[in-house]
Image (cartoon, rainbow, N blue to C red):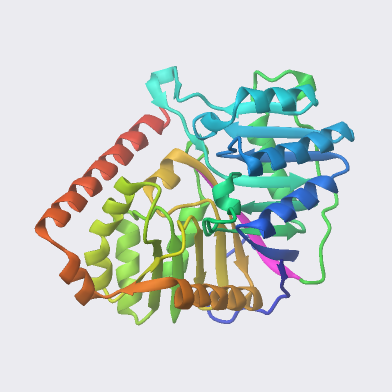
Amino acid sequence: MRAFKMKEPRKITFRRDYRDGHHIELLMSGEEYFAACEKAIDEARHYIHFQTYIVDDDQTGRRFVDALVRAAHRGVRVYFLIDAYGGSSFTKELATLMTEAGILFRRFSPAFISRGFQLSLRLHHKVLLIDGEVSILGGMNVADRYHGLPDKRQWLDFALLIRGPECSHVLFIVKKLWNKTFLGWKERAKESIHNPVSFEDGVKVRILQNNWYRNKIEILKSYRFALRHSHERMIIMASYFLPGRNERKLLRLASSRGVDIKIVFSAESDAPMFKKATKFLYDFILRNNISIYEYLPSNLHAKVATVDGMWSTIGSYNMNHLSDYGSIEMNAGVLDAEFSSRFEKLLLEIIDKDCRQITFEEYKRRKTWALQITDWCAYQLIRSLMRLMFILTSKRK
């Protein structure tokens, strides 16, 4: 785990709502992340909120569930909310084990809701909140593929451990999602934070959320602001990259201003159709002098960015319309030069050691008419599905 102190930003200045007084630690996928989560759970005294997209019934999933069960046996009040679709691999056996231990367990939202036949939002964020004092949020689900096995490298992803005033914002968000109207009084979350603790580290943090149904598109706006106001350089790690027209324009304009933009994708993806749709954009990206790298050792699941060594964002948000309009997402924006510079250095080391660059010449050599047509069809299919999802998830007046 890596702890960082504050240095005042000079070049990129975000307009509001970044609060200082935080201590943060960067966590990478693998044992580092899961050991930090287990330690935080074992130190819980009063309550735990855990909300996520996937928990598999494997070694890593059982380890996480066992830690929550231990906390419940100590008298800690544990709330566990998992997405109904993403959590389809979460077995009845594990659910029974938790409820028998006294854990308050619920699946978030069926695939469809009845009013107007709308497709419901998916719970895609991954957040663990302990006693309103420690928040761990990022892009990692709970499964062996994020931890790694002796013969298999973990999927690459990141998270932040946060202590400080923004934990109260995290509590507000998770309580709102948990406290549905049908819940009985005994199951409702009633916790509050009256005097949030500040730390001398003074790192400025803002918790950002996307929840289209609640008119929240804060993460998307933060990316747009970063693209508009970047001066020198930007690194984006994107697992499922399919930006809209506005974001593509901002990428093009930033590059034309001389901003050095590096985008890192996975060489192989767990979503082959989405990967083909992303590859259709390679031509646009390379023609606009934006560098493309592909991560080789395993699947890249990270959703992070850094700008000018001043600002960083880490969380569950992908640059596509599904994260914009079809999922509930949570990121941490960090406005701190020391943290962002070190995070940028780490990303550059990963690019140097574990990635290959896709040059425009190589792309043209590899591109055939058959591949171009296949990628175009995948792009059009994914875009059409996202437009349909946007229509179905829109509020009816």
Q: Position of residue 131 (x, y in %)?
A: 82, 45
Q: Position of residue 116 (x, y in %)?
A: 39, 20
Q: Position of residue 374 (x, y in %)?
A: 18, 50
Query: Residue 89 lies in magenta, yes or no?
Result: no
**Image quadrant for the C terminus?**
top left
Q: Can you name the residue that lies furthest to the front here?
A: 151
Residue 238 is left or right of residue 144, and the answer is left
Q: Nearer the viewer, residue 255 or 91?
A: 91
Q: Nearer the viewer, residue 278 or 5?
A: 278
Q: How many numbered discs sit on the rendered protein?
A: 0
Residue at 57 percent of width and 51 percent of height: 146
Above or below, 212 relative to 334: above
Residue 208 visible at all: no
Residue 45 is left or right of residue 187, and the answer is right
Above or below, 10 relative to 178: below
Residue 266 visible at all: yes
**Image quadrant for the N terminus?**
bottom right
- Please give the range of residues in magenta: 202-211
Q: Position of residue 388 (x, y in %)?
A: 30, 34
Q: Can you name the residue that lies furthest to the left here?
A: 369
Query: Would you say the magenta stretch is mainly helix, strand or loop?
Result: strand
Examine the image and state in which quarter residue 285 appears.
Answer: bottom left
Residue at 78 percent of width and 72 percent of height: 201
Residue at 67 percent of width and 57 percent of height: 31
Residue 139 is left or right of residue 65, and the answer is left
